[in-house]
Image: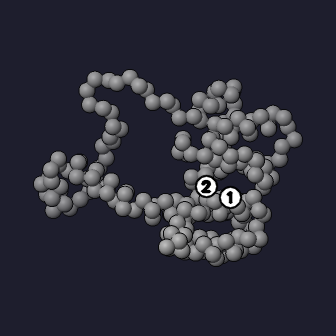
Amino acid sequence: MDQSSTCTAFVDGNFFTFGPPWEVALTVKAALEKGGTGEILVFDDGSGRLLDFDLRGSDQEIVARLRPAPADGAKAPGRPKLGVVAREVTLLPRHWDWLASQPGGASVTLRKLVEGARSANSARDAARQAQQAADRFMAAMLGNEQGYEEASRALYAGDRRRFEAFTEAWPAELRDHARRLAMPAFAEEVAAEAS
């Protein structure tokens, strides 16, 4: 789970709470301590995956497990730590020759190529991530609803109108959340309609 992400909790298929993981975890813990709560399911909004929080210990301990650690302001002498990880890359000899002839060498050139590809494909990557997140959520919470398979196909086809039509009869709170997760998948279609 991306530590900066949000998550959404449902109780017996109804919206319960939304927010950063540590806030949702504390709300869920408080509800469980009061008793009488139905089945609580929490989903990561970025991935659509079901989350299982460790609610043991004090509120501070729960927050410490789920909140991202603050960046340390102290600077160490020398080069900054960039989090560089050495891994193996397999290329043909002509690729290595070309990389070696580039300013800065192979590592600098590969980093620039990767960053360029990330930038060029960011909209497509965001759409794919939204499709996967919405589909995971729908499979878990709405997989038995009429029109689920058709809605999933429309989602992956990027057809917002068909997706909305097939999801219209679903329980409102679950349908609205699935649509919210799916919205980035239809960004190109929405932009084309606006122009």
Residue 132 visible from this viewpoint: no
Between discs 1 and 2, the one toward the N terminus: 2
| In front of the other: 174 or 84 | 174
Establish if 157 lies above or below 84. Answer: below
Left of 35 or right of it: where is 27? left
Q: Which residue is mark 2?
A: 48
Q: Amino acid at mark 2?
A: Gly
Q: Is 56 in front, or is 17?
A: 17
Q: Where residue 57 sits: x, y (%)? A: 69, 27
Q: Is residue 173 left or right of residue 6?
A: right
Crowding around mark 1 (Cα neighbors within 10 Å: few <14, some 14 to 19, many 20+) is some
Query: Residue at the location (54% across, 62% down)?
Result: 184
Can the viewer see residue 88? yes
94 left or right of 152? left
Tag count: 2
Residue drawn at x 65%, y 26% is 60
Find residue 145 and name its label. none
Q: Which residue is mark 1?
A: 177
Residue at 34% across, 24% down: 75
Q: Tell me which residue sits at (54%, 42%) in the image.
A: 4
| Horizontal relation, residue 102 to residue 128: left or right | left
Q: Mark 2, residues whose alpha carbon is within 10 Å: few (<14), some, or many (≥20)?
A: many
Quadrant occupied by the N terminus: top right
